[in-house]
């Protein structure tokens, strides 16, 4: 399994859904759809997304990985 990071490619807003999809071997669009549908239910989904956006490291590129 890949590391849980926010990828540089394939992200729409923060890259959280793309990172989760890569980590669990799913399509990014599937994870995005699950997130949007889950927002219709009561709960802290949006706050969790913001927390993951802040806490997950960004993917390092070869020019920044030193």
Image: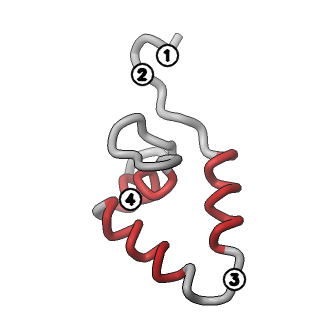
Q: Residue at x 55, y 86 (%)?
A: 40
Mark in front: 2 vs 3: 3
Image x and y of residue 18, in percent: 40, 53
Splitting the image into 4 quarters, where does residue 62 fall?
top left
Q: Which residue is mark 3?
A: 43
Q: Which residue is mark 2?
A: 61
Mark in front: 3 vs 4: 3
Question: In whole angstroms, how far apart are the C-alphas of marks 1 and 2?
Answer: 6 Å
Question: In whole angstroms, how far apart are the C-alphas of marks 2 and 3?
Answer: 35 Å
Q: Which residue is mark 1?
A: 65
41 shown above or below 9:
below
Q: Which residue is mark 4?
A: 21
Q: Nearer the viewer, residue 13 or 9?
A: 13
**Upstream in the sequence, badge 1 or badge 4?**
4
Contact between labelled residues 4 and 3, with CB atoms less than 8 Å apart: no
**Upstream in the sequence, badge 3 or badge 4?**
4
The total of numbered circles placed on residues is 4
Question: In whole angstroms, how far apart are the C-alphas of marks 3 and 4?
Answer: 21 Å
Question: In whole angstroms, how far apart are the C-alphas of marks 2 and 4?
Answer: 19 Å
Contact between labelled residues 3 and 2, with CB atoms less than 8 Å apart: no
* Lateral position of residue 62 relative to residue 4, left or right: left
Q: Nearer the viewer, residue 63 or 47?
A: 47
**Upstream in the sequence, badge 2 or badge 4?**
4
């Amino acid at each position: 399994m890949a590391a849980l990071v926010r990828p540089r490619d394939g992200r729409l807003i923060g890259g959280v859904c793309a990172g989760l999809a890569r980590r669990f071997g799913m399509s990014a669009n599937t994870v995005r759809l699950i997130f949007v549908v889950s927002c219709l239910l009561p709960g802290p989904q949006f706050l969790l997304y913001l927390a993951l956006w802040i806490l997950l490291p960004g993917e390092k590129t070869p020019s920044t990985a030193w």
